[in-house]
Amino acid sequence: MATYRDTGVVLRTQKLGESDRIVTVLTKTRGRKRIVARGVRKTSSRIGARLEPFSLVDVQCYEGRTLDSVTQVESLASYGADLSQDYQRWTAGQAMLETAERLTSEEGEPAVQQFLLLVGGLRALANNDHESGLILDSFLLRSLAVAGWAPTFDDCARCGDPGPHRAFHPASGGALCQQCRVPGYSLPSEGTLELMGALLAGDWAVADVSTARQRRDAAGITSAYLQWHLERHLRSLPYVER
C-alpha cells in the first residue's frame, strides 16, 4: 500500500474498538486527516502518548480504503504539558484546536496557512508570550481571514466610508458608519476595534497595552463573528476564562 509522511498537530482523539483510536490531525501538506492508530490504548503501546491533543508530530501512514493508518510517529513538540498547568491557557488552546477543525471542513484539502497559524498560536500559549485571551482572539481573527472572512475594523463594511467607526455588525462583515448601521449592531468601548485590528495584524505593541474592558469587548465581538460564519457554537468557547 502507498505510504506517506507529514507533520501535523493532533486536534482530538476518539475510541475505536477495544484498543484503537481515531486521531484527527491537521497536517501541513494534506490538511485535516482522520487516521487510525491501532493498539495505542494498550499499556504496551509506544506511540500512544505521542498522539494526544496539542502534540506536534511527524507521522507516517499508509493509505487505507476508508481511513489511513499510522505506522510510525515521532514527537516534535508537546504543548499540552505546559498548557495543562494553567486553566486559562488550556481552555484557550482547546478553542483553537476546535476552530482549526471547523475551518478545515474538507478532509484532505491542503491548509498550510491554517496549520502554521495553529502551531504559532499553540507555541505562543505554551511560552506565555502574551495574555492568553489576546492570543486566542488573534488566532481566531487570523484563521477567519485565511478562510476568506477577514473583517474590517476601520472603513465601513457596507459603503466603504473611511473610518474609524465604532459600530460593528458580524453579518455585515465589520465596522459600520452612522448611516449604514442596521439592527443588531454592537457599540463596543472606544479603542476596541483598534485592538481587534492590531490582533489581526499581529501588532502586539498595541494589543499588550489595551485595557481590560477593551479586551472583554473584543472577545465578545470576536466570538460572535466566529460563530456567525461557522453557523454553530464552539463547545469549548464558553469554558474560556476572560
Image (spheres, rainbow, N blue to C red):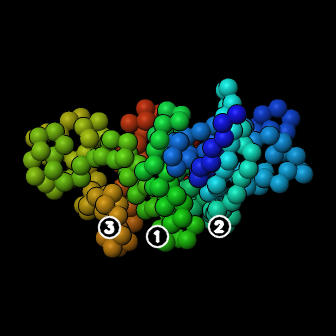
| Residue 16 appears in the rendering | yes
SS state under label 3 = loop
Depth check: give the residue in front, 228 or 22: 22
Q: In this view, does 209 lie above or below 170?
A: below
What label sits on residue 82 in the rendered view?
Answer: 2
The amino acid marked with disc number 2 is Asp
Kind of residue at badge 1: His
> Residue 187: x and y, percent?
26, 50
Q: Residues within 10 Å of mark 2 (few under 14, many from 20)?
A: some
CB under 8 Å between callouts 1 and 3? no
Q: Residues within 10 Å of mark 1 (few under 14, many from 20)?
A: some
Determine which of the numbered discs, if any, sits on residue 203 in the image.
3
The residue located at (66%, 50%) in the rendering is 59
Residue ID for mark 1:
130
Query: Mark 3 or mark 2, which is nearer the start of the sequence?
Result: 2
How far separated are the C-alphas under marks 1 and 3?
12 Å
As drawn, the residue found furthest toward the right would be 44
Which of 194 and 108 lies nearest the eye of the viewer? 108
Point out the tag, 1 or 3, that comes first from the N-terminus.
Answer: 1
Residue 168 vs residue 230, the one in the foreground: 230
User: Image quarter for residue 37?
Assistant: top right
Work out how far the residue at label 2 is from the one at label 3, CA to CA, in angstroms: 25 Å
Residue at the extreme front: 1
Q: Earlier in the sequence, mark 2 or mark 1?
A: 2
Query: The residue tagged with tag 2: helix, strand or loop?
Result: helix
Report whether residue 168 is seen.
no
Which amino acid type is marked by label 3?
Answer: Asp
